[in-house]
Image: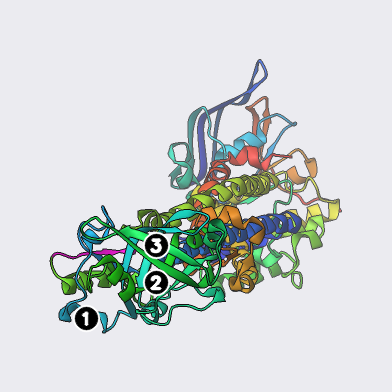
Amino acid sequence: MSAIACNQLCKTFRQGEEIIMGLDDVCIEIPEGSFVCLSGPSGSGKTTLLNAMGGLDTPDSGQITVGQYRVDCLSRSELADMRLDSIGFVFQAYNLIPVLSARENVEFVMQVQGVPGAKRRALALQVLEEVGLRGLEERLPAEMSGGQQQRVAVARAIANQPALVLADEPTANLDTRSAAHLMDLFVTLNRERGITFVISTHDARVMGYARRLISMRDGRIVADREQEPHAMEV
Amino acid sequence: MHWPLSALFTLAWRNLWRNYRRTLIMLLAIAIGVWAMIFMSALMRGMTDQMVRNGLHTLPGEVQLHHPHYRDDPSVVNAMPPPSAQLLRFLDSAPVVAWSARVRVPAVVASERGSRGVTLLGIDPAAESALGAVPDNLVEGRFLQGPDDRGLVIGASLARRLETRLGKRVVIMSQDPDNNVADWGVRIVGVYRARLQGQEDQFVYAGRSVVQDMLKIQDRVSEIALTADDYRHVAAWYPAAAAAAGNGIETLPWYELDTFLGTMLSVQDGFSLIFMVVIFLALSFGLVNTLVMAVFDRVREIGLMQALGMRPGLILVQLLLESLFLLCLGLVAGNLLAYITIKPLESGIDISGVAQGMEMMGMGTTLYPALAPRDMVMSTGVVVILGLLASLLPAWRAAQLDPVRALNKI
């Protein structure tokens, strides 16, 4: 079954007088349990496609299906519910809520979902341990390194057991060691929990982890191939 | 939809203290605004209360009984018989605390150097004293000792205008029921001072029996004044007084006798409310600015919460909660400040420096602010309701942010 299916997606942006094609007739199908990288230079449409898949941005035309949801037909509130229940996000900047501790950040999504306090606390602690942050649970984001913050973001993204994780340049602000550690974590989660990962990157080392590599340029898919994954050299 | 209240409360409370300097400044502004609302209301309430009490002192009484035409023509022609047995039973029982039957007619008092129009009051001093209607500041001589006392007590200001003094004789002139001049040469036995100079000029006191003899009205009186324990409760009991007085006697509460006073009391709450709203309107600019800045500082965070699956409605509620916390803290501080500053002043503020101006409003030289719980409740209601309304627009705009634009905001 498809985790994501996009059909003839188009999205334009206006930049002054100029119209820029963000997505140009993008058709793509990503099966459940995939580990996919979207690659391409800046402005190629990776983030636009990722945002459209996550219901953060609406395409001008075309259809997107994520699991059972027709993303292009949902209201703002329905999109929010879909993201809450089905998608975990990891962004380039660490994007944690600064007034919440690491544990509270991880608990946040479950709290909004209505998971009981004791259960979500136990889950949050377990996931934080999984991402190697045991002992740092009560630290505020400002008291953690960039790598640690990104791991908290990953813990938050997977804590509520989503079917899909969308990661936008997750290693862009990390050193090589932290980036490798994060990608290893993604691979493990993909293998052990069957979570579908779609990662946008222009880092060749990150692309190496993908089993499927989709290249984009000027809003179009220019290549889509399966590959043998290999880990980053640290 | 699930309402993650604990998450919303936590976020709202902690976000409030992210920029604690801005929050403290806004708290201070709200506290001072609330204090100003309550303080000004307490002053206005104290002024109104004093105006009513002074008015009742002058009327006097909370309820008066008259001949039906007396108020149109307060001459002896419209005098009424003394209280009937039925009325006496009512007057001597609760809730009536004190009552007095008096003769009250327009008259002229003349000394050897001048004359003035006055109101001649023929009273029973003991009954009037119980009613609280006798001058309480006798500066010279003595007050009347009984209804048959043949002396006259006048105000210090009137004595000055007539260029007369204690012990001098003056002539009182009025009309008897046959419209003949009734006059009486009388010696001044006492001079009083009143809180309002106008009272000193207007009222002269004589024994009731003596005045009745002078006017040839036997035991008839002009009015019966009665009072209970609180002028605010008069509406509940004055119909019983009217029933006891029977037909042919007009029974009126103080707010109908003096409609200006009655209106003052009834518009008091309206004035306070308008005043509070005006203060809050000034305050709301600061509040809205604080919330707008708080949203502006957190655009990315709001975008993140949307991306994580928080509905726009929940973001709106979270920001309104933040505003509510700010308002509530300001209210607590403002109410406390008001209590601390008004309570010690309830014993009176000396305003003798502007006494002449205040006298025109029926007030004395001391102002007694009255801290009323209803003012605290009203200011709380105004601040919370208008505060949340003022916060609604910035909160709604934050909830409507486009998540992609918000997340990419630098």
Outermost residue toward the left?
Answer: B247
Dot 1 or dot 2: first in sequence order is 1
Q: Which residue is mark 3?
A: B172
Secondary structure of the residue carrying tag 1 is helix
Q: Residues within 10 Å of mark 2 (few under 14, many from 20)?
A: many
The percent coordinates of residue A221 (x first, y second) are 63, 29
The percent coordinates of residue B331 (x first, y second) are 59, 63
Secondary structure of the residue carrying tag 3 is strand
Q: Which residue is mark 2?
A: B206
Given contact means CB atoms under 8 Å apart, are the residues at marks 2 and 3 in contact?
yes
Name the residue located 80 percent from the left edge and 63 percent from the top edge.
A143
Q: Which residues are magenta?
A: B248-254
Q: Residues within 10 Å of mark 1 (few under 14, many from 20)?
A: some
Image mark 3: chain: B
Given contact means CB atoms under 8 Å apart, are the residues at marks 1 and 3 in contact?
no
Q: Is residue B223 left or right of residue A187?
A: left
Name the residue located 26 percent from the left edge and 63 percent from the top edge.
B252
Secondary structure of the residue carrying tag 2 is strand
